Each structure stands twice: as C-alpha cells, then as structure tokens.
Amino acid sequence: MEFFSSVMQSALNFLSSLFVFAIGVLVLVLICFFVADVMQTRDAVRRNYPVIGRFRYLFSTLGEFFRQYFFAMDREEMPFNRAEREWVYKSSQGADNTIAFGSTRNLTVPGTAIFVNCPFPTLEEDALAAPPLVIGPYCRTPYEARSIINISAMSFGAISKPAVLALSMGAKMAGCWLNTGEGGLSPYHLEGGCDIVFQIGTAKYGVRGEDGGLNDERLREVAGHEQVRMIEIKLSQGAKPGKGGILPAAKVTPEIASIRGIEAGKDSISPNRHPEIDNIPELLEFIGHVREVSGKPTGFKAVIGGYGWLEKLCEAIQAAGIERAPDFITVDSGDGGTGAAPMPLMDNVGLPVKESLPIVVDILTRYGLRDRIRVIASGKLVTPAEVAWAYCAGADFVNSARGFMFALGCIQALKCNKNTCPTGITTHDRRLQHGLDPEEKSVRVRNFVEKMRYGTGLIAHSCGVPDPRSLRRYHCRIVQDGARSKPLDVLHPLVEVLPQYRAQTSDPT
C-alpha cells in the first residue's frame, strides 16, 4: 500500500512539474509573440494589439468552415449551396433524394426557372430516351453522341490521378463523354474505356512542339486513339476569360510535365489566347486544319461577352461553305469554375450561360447554321432543373464539371489551388489522394449521370414531351422583378432564318 501511495505521489509530482513546465513554455512563447508583434511594421493590428491581434487571422481562416457547417442556411452559400450539394451527394450515392414538407427554395427570386407543366403529362410507357445526335457530319469520323449530360473539361494536373480514373470508369458505365481539359491526354483518361473529348488549350499541352505551337504528328497520335471522339479548341474558359490556364508549380509533377510537354516543378501558365488565331478567318483555318489532321469532329469552347464576332463567323462560314463550320460550340458560363483564377475575371467578366446560351442559339438559327453546329452548354448546371432549362433554351448537350466533383466527394473546401484538397480530388499529395477510391467513386459518377437523366426526364414528362431534347422555350418561365414570371420565348423570342440562307441546307444527312 505504501508502495502504491509512493508511486501515485511521484506521478502527481511529475504531472505538476510537467504542468508548470508547459505553462512556462506557453508564457515564453507568448512573450516571443509579443516582442515580434510590437517590433514588426507590416501589420498594424498585430502592432497595436500584440498577440491578441493574431486571433483575427485564425478566426478568418476558420470562418468559412463554421459558416458552411453551422451558420449558413441550406440556400445561402456560394457558389453552390448546401441543398444543391446534398442533392448531388445523395444522387451519386444512389440514396433517396426526395424531400418533405415543401421546397426550401424561394421561388420568387428573379431569374428562377419555373417549368410549365401540362394537364396531361407524358406517361412513363410513352417516355423515350433522348435521341442521339451526330456531331461532325463532314469529317472522316463523325461522332454519334447520346448522353444529355457529360463531363466537362478538368485537366489531369488540376485534378488527381484517382479522380481522373474514377471519372473515366464512371463515364464508361454511364455512357457519357469525358473532356480531358487542356492538360493533355493521360493514360488515366483512357484506362476506363469511355469516350474522350480532347481539348487543345492555348499552350497546346499534349500536342505542342518545341516552339510551343501545334505539332501535327502529336495530334495524329492523340486522335489515333479510338476513344478520342472529338477535338475541342479552347478559346476561353468560364472563370477566367481572356487569361490562360494556371497550374501551380506544386502540381507540376514529373509525370504531369511529361504528359503536357513542359518543365517539372515550375508554374505552368498558358497564353491568354492562341497565337495562331487573331481573327475569324484564322479561327476557321485552325479548326479546319485540326479537323483535317485528326479526322475527328472539331469545335471550340468560349465564354460569350461581345457576340458580334459570332455573326461575322456565321457570315464567313456561309461564304466559305458550311462544311468549314465548327462542328460544335461549347458555351461556357461567366460564372464557371476553375482551380485558380484572378478574382476580377472570376467575378466580373463574361456573360452567365443563362444569358449567353439563347444568344448563341439565335445567331446560329438566324444564319441557317443551327442544324450544322451543335451547341453544348456548360457552367453551374448541376441539377435537373438547370439542365432542363438549357434544353429549353436550345442546347444539344450539357456539360458539368463541378457537379461531377461533388459526385466524387468534393466538399467545397475552396482549396483547389493549394494542393491541399481534403478529399483527394485536386491534390497530388499521395496521403490525401489515398482517401479517393476510384472503383467506389466511379459508381457514384454513374449514379449521378443516371439521376440527372431521370430528373431531367421527369421535368420533360411533366411538360408533356417524351424526352429532354423535345423541351422548347415555351415550356419554361423566368421569374422577374415583382415575383411575376415571363415565358422564356417572350424574353428570347425565336428568330427566323435570314431570307438569303433559307434555301441552303445545313444538314448533309
């Protein structure tokens, strides 16, 4: 008993000494912080309020997490609120994503889409899958594309190896395409066996020569893969129109550098436009050259700001012959996403897709090119309602990037540009990537596609049409100021083909 008491007393003495030591270390650290704060001149808050002023930065850093989990309401967050994210999470998990007790969304906010249900909806037995559409009828290898929702451009480098693998395998299971983004074609894009859209960015990653220009031999090599079904030339991107891609040095691993054809360990910054393309004739020439070399349907991706150039493009196409037209145009939204972009461009440059998509469709219609040039809509379209709106506005296909990131498990931590993504999606830290299992996440990708098709189909059937591609502008109303809505075909009246182009056909099939 005395021995036990002796041991306990020794332990208490040790703990007491340890506590006093810890307090002493803490006091010493605080004194050091105090001296450092008083002596420094860069930060006025820390200089005037030494030690205490440091908590301001701690709370600012933690604030975004507290807002997300404790304070923000379901419909308040940006760029995607909790309700939107939860719908994607549940859909990708194959869980029940129905809700109870009414909508939590304020349906009187200007810009809200309200779909016009008919008294006699389409019966389930009369519902149809959206019909396939041919892209690139004049090229050597046209592409018959079926899926109404596809995976938008995300480069290997911007996202991780397991993320690319999951998307590739999931796209194969879902029967949709996967856009490589401007970072080149990696083995992981091909591994899943899905259809690939290869994107050529301004730096020509993956198909660049030593001078940084397009290398035809490398383009032939890329296009030689049977899975590569189309080539997309990126003129501009949603979150940063007028600026090239940005890949921080921490993400430029030797493998990524090899795939892109650049130097490892250095920031990778693309030019803000293709040096070869300075006007409409050069754009058509570049598209034609890429299509001839690759044999694949070739189009371009752009954020729409000024749109007079699109009319000049259509005039040039009609003058040169519709076979020289781009096979598709991807309309990206000014509020699109990216891993890293300057705030002035992300916040204030480029039209949102809600405004630009109808403009593009109407211009193509006016010049008799609507059937020749397919239109792909992209930008914050992550729920069936947004996809259905795009089809009402006139899209042929819809792409989503951030929707699929949520399907992979993205928690909107806003760390995409720091190589510290906690879910392993946008980081090349092996420890963080370990949490992303491609096999499991590929199933979530497939589930998300299927739920998007199902939900968009529900809206189409409620409006009385058999499939989403049968939706028209009169099926949708947009809420205006004063909580009154107007039909989309009143806000964007359907245009007629100009008389001089009516006799011309734009569909060789």
Image (cartoon, helix red, strand yellow):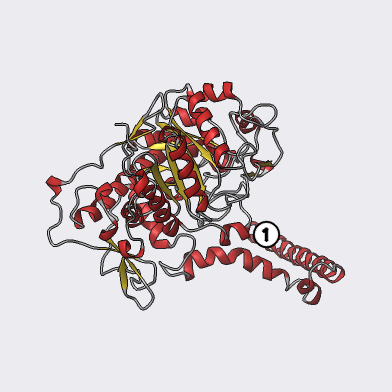
Residue that label 1 marks: 11
Q: Please identify the quarter of the rendering in which residue 507 is found.
A: top left
Horizontal placement of 111 versus 348: left or right?
left
Q: Position of residue 111 (x, y in %)?
A: 39, 67
Instruction: Locate the N terminus and report the quarter of the image it occupies.
Output: bottom right
The relative height of residue 497 versus residue 323 in the rendered view (above or below) is below
User: As rendered, which of 145 and 420 lies closer to the eye?
Assistant: 145
- Residue drawn at the location 32% of the way across and 75% of the way down: 484
* Residue 278 point in image, percent of width and height: 62, 42
Query: In the picture provided, is 473 more to the left or to the right than 312?
Result: left
Q: Is residue 125 visible?
A: yes
Whether residue 437 is visible, yes or no, is no
Q: Residue at x 42, y 51 (%)?
A: 360
Image location (x, y in percent) of residue 29: 79, 64
Residue at point 68% right, 67% down?
A: 57
494 w.r.t. 201: above or below: below
Q: Which quadrant holds residue 200?
A: top right
Q: Residue farthest to the right?
A: 39
Disc 1 crowd rating (10 Å Cα; few below 14, some 14-19, many 20+) is: few
